[in-house]
Image (spheres, rainbow, N blue to C red):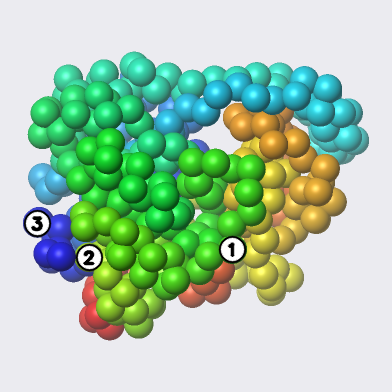
């Protein structure tokens, strides 16, 4: 498979929601020869438009925007109420209250329409496969469509729906797992998943999950990927919009490993194994985005207090490789090792 057109180096910046993937980070990655991505998750349509506008002012190269595909509302109200009661002491300790647990489509239809009307170079999706009509509309507008997959069956579904490329996400990835079906625990490492997906479909593949070195990128490309997507490696850069406490935690000796949890959002996500994750993860219901909104005020208060044991600290398995260096330097160093 050929590399992504226009890239000088086979590196893609993962879209990291919650303000982490700033226009400045996108521009820095683009300037270094990679492909930057904005994350439209948890933002309003207007905020997404503003981020795109600012990014265009900072870089003349193509970049991408990521959307969350909404899931059906299958939450158990009683389970959510129990979890809210469980978190009341956490909220009280931080001087706040749990938020209201509710379902949202994250303004998906409006965001999709905005991207069709004002297209960007790439649009990627996570949490499910968009409808074939949605993909066709974006492609007709001139965007390359990428769908995040975590199995061969998901890969086939995405290709059948018209996806131009796939982001193959191994279990090592930080943040939310991109599975179409979040009910089953994932165990397949990236190397094995890449080989399986490569044997199933013929579209170009991006490799994601635990990639932090040039050697990791070489291995991913040897397994069939055209480029590597990395997020955790960029979290501590000055261009990253991650909370300072989150950046500090990645270098804090008290955190020795990561784990997958529903504790903060109701969807499986990998982060540093802190107290909140350990204590509440086993009790958290499978209810996304309900739990995300429920824990929102608690997480915000923990961030203000720099309480690393109560904060969601998304990170991949290679988090120790994250450095406080300009994003362009990080990309250049990785590219030199490919």
Question: Going by the image, does 227 lie left or right of 97?
Answer: left
Residue 197 at x, y percent in the picture: 35, 61
* Crowd around label 1: few <14 · some 14–19 · many ≥20 (10 Å): few
Q: Residue at x 54, y 20 (%)?
A: 104
> Between disc 1 and disc 2, whose residue precedes?
1
Quadrant in which the C terminus is drawn: bottom left
Q: Residue at x 34, y 16 (%)?
A: 110
**Disc 2 and disc 3 in contact, CB within 8 angstroms:** no
C-alpha distance separating marks 3 and 1: 34 Å
Question: Going by the image, does 211 lie left or right of 328?
Answer: right
Q: Which residue is mark 2?
A: 226
- The quarter of the picture where residue 334 lies is bottom left
Q: Residue at x 55, y 24 (%)?
A: 72
- The quarter of the picture where residue 48 lies is top left
Tell me the tag on residue 6.
Answer: 3
- Give the structural element (helix, strand or loop) at label 2: loop
Tell me the tag on residue 187.
Answer: 1
């Amino acid at each position: 498979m050929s590399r992504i057109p226009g890239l000088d180096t086979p590196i893609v910046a993962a879209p990291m929601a919650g303000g982490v993937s700033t226009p400045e980070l996108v521009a820095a990655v683009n300037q270094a020869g990679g492909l930057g991505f904005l994350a439209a998750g948890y933002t309003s349509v207007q905020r997404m438009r503003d981020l795109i506008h600012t990014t265009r002012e900072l870089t003349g190269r193509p970049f991408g925007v990521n959307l969350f595909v909404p899931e059906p509302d299958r939450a158990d109200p009683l389970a959510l109420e129990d979890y809210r009661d469980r978190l009341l002491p956490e909220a009280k300790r931080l001087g706040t209250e749990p938020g209201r647990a509710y379902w949202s489509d994250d303004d998906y239809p409006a965001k999709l329409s905005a991207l069709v009307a004002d297209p960007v170079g790439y649009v990627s999706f996570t949490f499910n496969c968009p409808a074939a009509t949605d993909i066709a509309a974006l492609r007709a507008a001139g965007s390359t469509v990428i769908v995040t997959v975590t199995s061969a069956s998901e890969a086939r579904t995405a290709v059948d729906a018209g996806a131009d490329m796939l982001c193959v996400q191994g279990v090592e990835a930080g943040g939310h797992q991109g599975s179409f079906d979040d009910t089953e625990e994932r165990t397949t490492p990236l190397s094995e998943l890449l080989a399986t997906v490569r044997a199933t479909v013929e579209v170009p593949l991006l490799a994601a999950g635990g990639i932090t070195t040039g050697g990791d990128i070489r291995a991913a490309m040897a397994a069939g990927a055209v480029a590597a997507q990395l997020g955790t490696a960029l979290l501590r850069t000055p261009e990253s919009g991650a909370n300072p406490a989150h950046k500090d935690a990645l270098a804090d000796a008290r955190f020795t490993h990561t784990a997958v949890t529903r504790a903060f959002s109701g969807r499986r996500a990998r982060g540093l194994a802190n107290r909140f994750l350990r204590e509440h993860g086993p009790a958290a219901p499978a209810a996304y985005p309900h739990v995300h909104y429920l824990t929102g005020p608690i997480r915000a208060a923990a961030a203000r207090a720099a309480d690393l044991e109560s904060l969601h600290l998304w990170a991949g398995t290679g988090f120790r490789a994250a450095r406080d260096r300009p994003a362009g330097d990080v990309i250049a160093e990785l590219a030199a090792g490919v």
